[in-house]
Amino acid sequence: MTLVIVTEGMLFAYLLFGYFYLGSMTPGAFPTDGPPELKLVIPNTIVLLISSGTMYWAERGIRAGNQGRLRLGMLVTLVLGILFLIVQGIEYSHKRFAFQTNAYSGLFFTITGFHGFHVFVGLLMNVVVQVWAWRGWFTSERHLAVTNAAMYWHFVDGVWLVVFFSLYITPRFS
Amino acid sequence: MATTTVPGQLPERLTRIWETAPGLYGVLATVDHKTIGKRYLVTSMLFLLIGGADAAIMRLQLTHADAHIVSPETYNQLFSMHGITMIFWYAAPVLSGFSNYLWPLMLGARDMACPRANALSYWTFLMSGVFLYTSVLVGQVPDRGWFAYAPLTEAAFSPGLNMDFYAIGLTFLSVSTSVGAINFIVTLFKTRAPGLSVNRLPIFVWGTLTTSFAVILATPALTAACVLLYLDRRFGSHFYDPGRGGSALLWQHLFWSFAHPWVYIVVLPAMGMISDLIPTFCRRPLVGYTLVALATVSTGILGFGVWVHHMFATGLPATASSFFSAASMVITIPSAIAVFSWLATIWHGRPVFKTPMLFAAGFIVLFVVGGVSGVATAANAYDLQLTDTYFIVAHLHYVLIGINVFAVMAGFYFWLPKITGRMMSETLGKLNFWLMFLGFGVGFFPMHTLGLMGMPRRIYTYSSGFGWGWQNVWVTVGAYVFALGVVVFIVNFFWSLVFGEAAGANPWDAPTLEWAIPSPPPDYNFEHIPIVASRHPLWEDRLDEGTGRTVFDGPVLDRKRDTFGTTPLDAEPQEILRMPEDTVWPFVVSLSILVIAYGLLFGLMWLAIVGTVGLFIAIIGWLLPSHEPTASPVET
């Protein structure tokens, strides 16, 4: 799982390389219409960070053999993850540019969309593992699936921080 | 590891545990690394023949000035498919085939660490190849070269499905290479025989390990490049379109930051094969084992810092070019370490020139020539003169045929007796070598001079006034002699299956673990898991290396599919791993990805959704936790 995460992380690294490369090659301001709004994305980032905390809490729970903490923690994580995707959808609908407008708009939607897709995959993992969790398949010794789902979820959150700083914060300092 | 049964019954019991079910189910469900390795070898060699046929037609077209044997459009398709097939679907997969077959045997294990992922990596390799070659059936074959520079590949300049096959096909293939690489890394750090510490690994294992790390770090660049290309072509984005803030050079940066590491991916395991084979035929250990292992790893790392040397002619700032030029020259240091270690091994040994050794010697010659032309083109000013000429074609063929194909041939002559249990003919083998070696020299050396005379690569035809004619005749003749050598190899292979004498466990008197078991190896590989005491387990008595002796009648692990889990560096036994049974899910996963690929290609959303649902179901079926323990502590 660690290696899957490394190679997926590299994929984001290369996409962000594309973003910074085009940024450095574009004369004048990049993006041309100024940096993206922070109004929705900051609360949304906090939502995602909290969901990492609840996932951690759930995994620690099953390590101690606590089924209740596992189920509750994963359920809250799932709800927060769905909330993140909904807010991101709202933000997309407020954008003044479309995917086809220019290279920047394409990269914005590709990178955030790719991340959104990873959130979605993380949620699918969460659902499957949760079904198993509610059936009581995990014990304090046997919970590799939970650990993997948790690792993946923390990875998705970590990548979001990098994406967030690259797409939303760095344009404010250039 | 006390057992209550009679030792004589052990082989049958282990066979019952490890054998694959007969019939179609077994074909689709097997997870045996030996079967998967053989499939990899056969499939990639078929791709070699297809790519070779492309080249044979191209050489006919280029033999004379002003020839029109094929149309210019067909010619574009031929050189594109030749490159794509050879570089992506032959050169790396054939090495994966050797690694898949040999790793568990060299490591003293019963299988790879993730046998199901191993099956997945083969099935996705096969199906991505099927996908790519559908383009021939549809008549819309990729035709913009194997490195597919934007903006020529954008929808405006390349309508039709041609380059969509390229973008989707390569993304598909990258699933296979990534999964395979992850499996190699886990296998190395988890399932070696007790005592096989990292300083005792064959160099070939070091090569594939380095390569695997390179794959998981570099392949995403290709995936990113291809996904962006597909979005540009099909969804109207502008990543490679300078008119809307994009950049055509973005493609080159992404592509080469993948493709230069890829060059080392297709040569490092091959160099490793040579490093393990030369000592056997020189009757002495490799000179400078530690240096060669370190050189392998450092080449893999340096390979990430040189991609811009493919782009010297794109008008980058001089500082950037100088940096990458210097970085490219630094790579000669680890390469030279390897070359001098081989030479020293031959010098201090008593070389026996059987066919594998001949190919290894030929390999060293071509490696040096290809290396020198590589250093030459690493020099910025020189490269500006020669870029996109036949000099580059000469260089890359010296490197890819010299360091990949010659090593693969050496590997086949060396290890096929282990795989088939039959010796190949030495007479045919020597004929095979000389045809390939002389054919290669006659065919590819003149490409250097053609390049210096200004013949551009990928040119469809040329006018007789340039004076390139007679050298092109040489090239064609040499290429056909080389191809004849390949035919002799195929004949020799089938000859050995019918007439070859039985190989026995260790026909070459080689030192490593794979030669300790019968040829062909039984389903369970090792009856007793060996406990390794040195780098050359089968030469210990002669070398007097260290004090211990490798134990070959140790633990048997015969309850179910069990193998040892060991610590990453010293290979201390940690636990007994329960390996998975045969399963069709890897096949279903690959088939689902194939369906998705066709859906994306033809723009059929419903088809892509069907594939995605299939993929989801297959993954859940695969991951369904079993109620049996997967590992248990070692009891001694």
Image: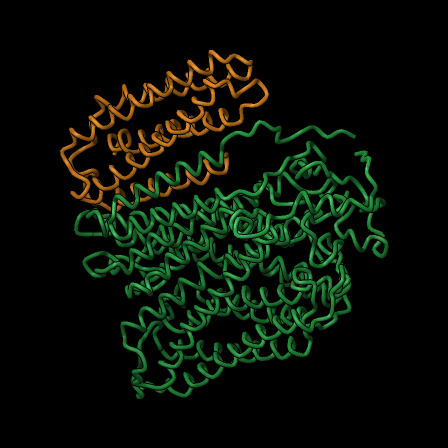
Chain colours: A orange, B green
- The C terminus of chain A sits in image quarter: top left
What is the number of callouts on the image?
0
Left or right: B485 as drawn, with respect to B516: left
Direction front: furthest residue: B23
Which residue is found at the position 74% from the left and 47% from the top?
B12
Which residue is found at the position 18% from the left and 58% from the top?
B156
x then y, percent, for residue B399? 51, 66
x then y, percent, for residue B502? 74, 66
x then y, percent, for residue A154? 43, 26
Which residue is found at the position 86% from the left and 54% from the top?
B541
Left or right: B453 as drawn, with respect to A44: right
Q: Nearer the viewer, residue B395 or B24?
A: B24
Q: From the viewer's perspective, is residue B424 above or below residue A140?
A: below
Q: From the viewer's perspective, is residue B266 above or below residue B26?
A: below
Q: Is residue B144 visible?
A: no
Q: Nearer the viewer, residue A166 or A120?
A: A120
Q: Is residue A110 visible?
A: yes
Which residue is found at the position 50% from the left and 34% from the top?
A2
